[in-house]
Amino acid sequence: MFSEEKLNKVKEIIARYPEGKQKSALIPLLHLAQEEFGGWLSPETMDYVGSLLQITPIEVYEVATFYSMFNLKPVGKYLFEVCQTGPCMLNGSDQIIDYIKQKLKIGVGETTPDGLFTLKTVECLGACGYAPMMQLGKHFREHLTPEKVDAIIAECRSKANAN
Amino acid sequence: MQLLQNAGQKQTQTKEQVRRIINEYMGRKLLLDKAHIEGIRYYDTYRKNGGYEAAGKVFKTMSPDLVVEEVKKSGLRGRGGAGFPTGMKWSFLAKPEGVPRYLVCNADESEPGTFKDRYLMEFLPHLLIEGLLIASYALGSHSTYIYIRGEYAWIPDILEEAIAEAKQNGWLGKNIQGTGFDLEIYVQRGAGAYICGEETALIESLEGKRGNPRIKPPFPAVKGLWQCPTVVNNVETLAAVVPIINIGGEEYAKIGIGKSTGTKLISACGNIKKPGVYEIDMTISVEEFIYSDEYCGGIPKGKRLKACIPGGSSVPILPANLLLKTAKGETRMMTYESLNDGGFATGSMMGSGGFVVLDEDQCVVRNTYTLARFYHHESCGQCSPCREGTGWMKRVLHNIEYGKGKMSDIDLLWDIQRKIEGNTICPLGDAAAWPVAAAIRHFRDEFEWHVKNPNAAQQRNFGIAHYADPLPVAAAAV
């Protein structure tokens, strides 16, 4: 269940569309739910979002499964989404992915046993001039090198310890 | 100068006049001219530097139809990739009584190699808001949506802040500047789907559905968002409306060559010294763009130019010799027409302006494989030629790249791409087919090399520095 504050946000989002077109709020609400409920969308979460918009569960599932940003199974606390498309590849994204695999001892799509990191490869994120790059949470980490990857991993670990 | 002959569309201008115009406008910037000003992201600074003057002019002196006329006169072409004349698109908008009309800004920038809209939204959000305001007024939209790709997760905050500032200063909301015109602008995030850059898929997504493109007709101009008349325009296109109003459509049309009027943002990446977003007036050559210090600054580590994808991953890759000069031996210019010179046999396209440079160490097979994987990942799955074909091409290319390919695979790839092209509802099928076709057309020997040297290919040996033709050394001259 969303908090009072988030429910107000939900209302504000629905008000952006004409009367009766509240289904348009589905993707924004799924983003909100994913942020709020542990970084992924469980069937229960999806049903809840559907109930907020008065649409059937299948209308939520078919959308959630279509868009690659929605995680349908649990992910680590820190999700490394590394771009591997053409322009990033030209600038060494293959080597960066290999480095992360070796450093975290996981494969693509896997999560470290401590639940901290998940490695995911993604297709073009629109940072081709600043390649190689990855998305971490809301922001992009660009011009990656093995040293920068080390620093990012250390940063995440210390943040996790602080909490 | 060969380029002057390309200016044939301007029948009334002499060669001297065209040359003068080119000299006068050389290096002129209309979109990014103020990007360097500290704090231009915020309303006060933007306003102090001439911001919202175009909107003010529109409200004081122009009717909506007059704005559409002005954009028509400017010759502005859609900057998202298709290059369709914007003024014409606007004039197609149906205006039935009592039915709302919508403007939707396409900020779903996802074409590999393209990152120009991100730059505009991040650094000049008010330029986009002003463009949206003018366009909404011209089209009669009272609720305008910016559909931005989900991965640009921090940009909605920037846009929403700019929207709030504009509202505080009376440029959005009810009765804007006392004109009686109402407008709200909303930002909607996508969630990771390249296909939502296609306008009907974008509309479906905005309605809270899967991004499956619609069959046209009806076109969005008649039945778009919630079955109402809708115009979908790219971020850069809408931003360009501001300078068009400021300097006038006729003046804007004088910049550039032929039907490539105005300025264009090019996002340059790959193996170049200075990757980034550049605004060019469409009068410079490809060679100048790559090697001049004002733009890409040449290729790092003294490497040679091997190939380039000049307009985003969907457009045909060109080997160096065909990139710098057309098949007729003319200088290739950074214009819609010149990049397209020779059709797909020996030319390419301006596309979205995603300019990807490959140096001599890069492997065209591997590059093509990553693009095929991209299109397979992004196919919405609605049409079987695209859904099956993109996966098939990816698997065949994977085999060739990893040393398991056969000679017959190259012809098979050619055959698959040919059967996708033109056989799908939306252009994603074509966009997936063209890069594969062009790679085989111009770099067949590299595919054959992979088949003949499976062990080296498995080691991902990138050191196959051979070309379809030897490279002209003209590069050093600039």
Image (cartoon, helix red, strand yellow):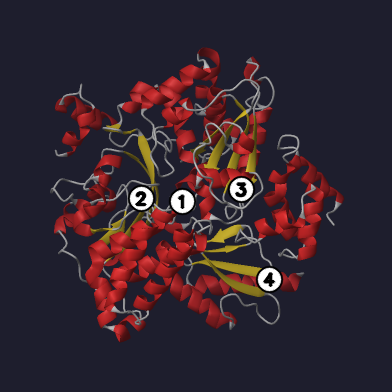
Question: For numbered disc 1, what is the local secondary structure?
Answer: loop
Residue positioned most to the top: B61
For residue B362, say whether it is visible: no
Q: CA distance from mark 1 to mark 4?
A: 28 Å
Q: CA distance from mark 4 to mark 3?
A: 25 Å
Badge 2 amino acid: Gly
Which image quadrant: the N terminus of chain B? top left
Subunit bearing disc 3:
B
Q: Do badges 3 and 1 share one subunit?
A: yes
Q: Can you identify the residue that label 4 sits on?
A: A75
**Which of the marked residues, 3 or 1, is nearer the chain's N terminus?**
1
Q: Do badges 4 and 2 share one subunit?
A: no
Q: Can you identify the residue that label 3 sits on?
A: B205
Badge 1 amino acid: Phe
Q: Can you identify the residue that label 2 sits on?
A: B311
**Residue displayed at 76% across by 64% down:** A43
Question: For numbered disc 3, what is the local secondary structure?
Answer: helix
Check contact, mark 4 vs mark 3: CB within 8 A.
no
Q: Is residue B382 above or below residue B369?
A: above
